[in-house]
Amino acid sequence: DKLYHLISFAILTLPIAVIRPKALWVIFILSVVYGGAIEVLQPLINRNCELADFLADVAGVALGMAMSKALVRLSPTIADEQ
């Protein structure tokens, strides 16, 4: 379950961070807030709010951003378009 959270938030964050590499802090903050909001709102639909899920979301955001930095460094065409 936690692995799915990590993967989904990495996939969510990666393309956004590749497109806007200069806005990494904004992307990070908004993605973490989104993950937190999902967890806080879950009790409204009879699901459990779990800190471990939130931490997996944050780890996924960090992974997606790290991968985007690597992609931007490896691909000069991506960096030139920014």
Image (spheres, grey):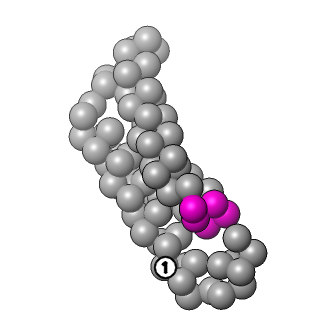
Q: Residue furthest right?
A: 81
Q: Can residue 68 be seen here?
A: yes
Q: Is residue 15 visible?
A: no
Residue at image coords 45%, 29%: 38
Q: Residue at x 57, y 62 (%)?
A: 22
Q: Residue at x 49, y 79 (%)?
A: 70
Q: Which quadrant holds residue 37? A: top left
Q: Quadrant of the C terminus?
A: bottom right
Majority secondary structure of magenta residues: helix
At 37% from the left and 15% from the top, the residue drawn is: 43
Residue at image mark 1: 70
Q: Amino acid at mark 1?
A: Ala
Q: Which picture quadrant has residue 33?
A: top left
Q: Is residue 9 above or below residue 35?
A: below
Q: Is residue 30 magenta?
A: no
Give the magenta range.
18-22
How packed mark 1 is, by other alpha carbons closer than 10 Å (few <14, some 14-19, many 20 or more), is few
Residue 72, position as x, y percentages in the image: 58, 78
Relative to 48, say whether 79 is above or below: below
Depth check: 39 or 69 in front?
A: 69
Residue 3 is left or right of residue 81, and the answer is left
Q: Position of residue 62 (x, y in %)?
A: 38, 59
**Please, is residue 34 above or below residue 74 in the view?**
above
Q: Whole-percent x and y of residue 71?
A: 55, 79
Left or right of residue 3: residue 34? right
For mark 1, give the secondary structure: helix
Q: Position of 2 compared to 41: left or right?
A: left
- Residue 28 in the image, given as x and y percentages of width and height: 45, 49
Above or below 80: residue 3? above
